[in-house]
Image (tube, grey):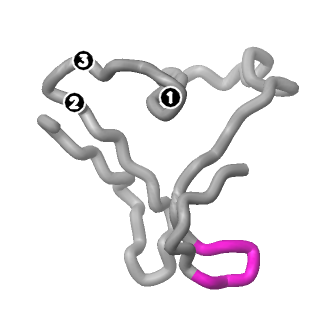
Amino acid sequence: MSEILVHPEYNSTNFANDIAIIRLSAHAIFNYYVQPICLWKLDKTDLSEVVGKTGTVIGWGITENGAISNVLQQA
């Protein structure tokens, strides 16, 4: 790992904006468990490329019951 970019508005008290980007020092090998994600420029406001497309969110965090998950979740 060469760099971790944490969301500038991350709040460790309520876990708001609990997302980060990890910049790797070597190329990742894609497989079933490691897949790329798409990020677009901040000035791009046309969401037609993503609206109606299937997406997946994966992570730990607060569940729909308000509890912190110890298990990786997927939606």
Q: Nearer the viewer, residue 46 or 25?
A: 25
Residue 52's quadrant in the figure? top right
Residue on which the image places disc 3: 27
Q: Which region of the structure is painted magenta? A: 62-67
What's under tag 2, amino acid-wise?
A: Leu
Which secondary structure lies at badge 2?
loop
Task: Name which residue lies at 37% across and 48% down.
Answer: 20
Above or below, comparing residue 69 to residue 33 in the picture = below
Residue identified by numbered label 1: 42
Q: CA distance from mark 2 to mark 1?
A: 22 Å
| Spot occupied by residue 8 in the image (x, y as percentages of width and height) | 35, 55
Label 3 to label 2, Cα distance in Å? Answer: 7 Å
Q: Which mark is first along the chain, 1 or 2?
A: 2
Q: State the CA–CA distance, disc 3 to disc 1.
A: 25 Å
Can you tell which quarter of the image residue 4 is in?
Answer: top left
Q: Earlier in the sequence, mark 3 or mark 1?
A: 3
**Label 3's element?**
loop
Quarter placement of the N terminus: top left
The residue depicted at 81 percent of the width and 24 percent of the height is: 53
Residue 14 left/right relative to 5: right
The residue wearing badge 2 is: 24
The picture places residue 74, in percent across and down from the top left corner, at 66, 51
Dot 3 crowding, Cα within 10 Å, few <14, some 14–19, many 20+: few
Mark 1: secondary structure: loop
Which amino acid type is shown beneath numbered disc 1? Leu
Question: Would residue 22 appear left or right of 64 to someone viewing this image?
Answer: left
How far across and down, in percent of the image, does residue 75 sit? 72, 50
Q: Are marks 3 and 2 in contact (CB under 8 Å)?
A: yes
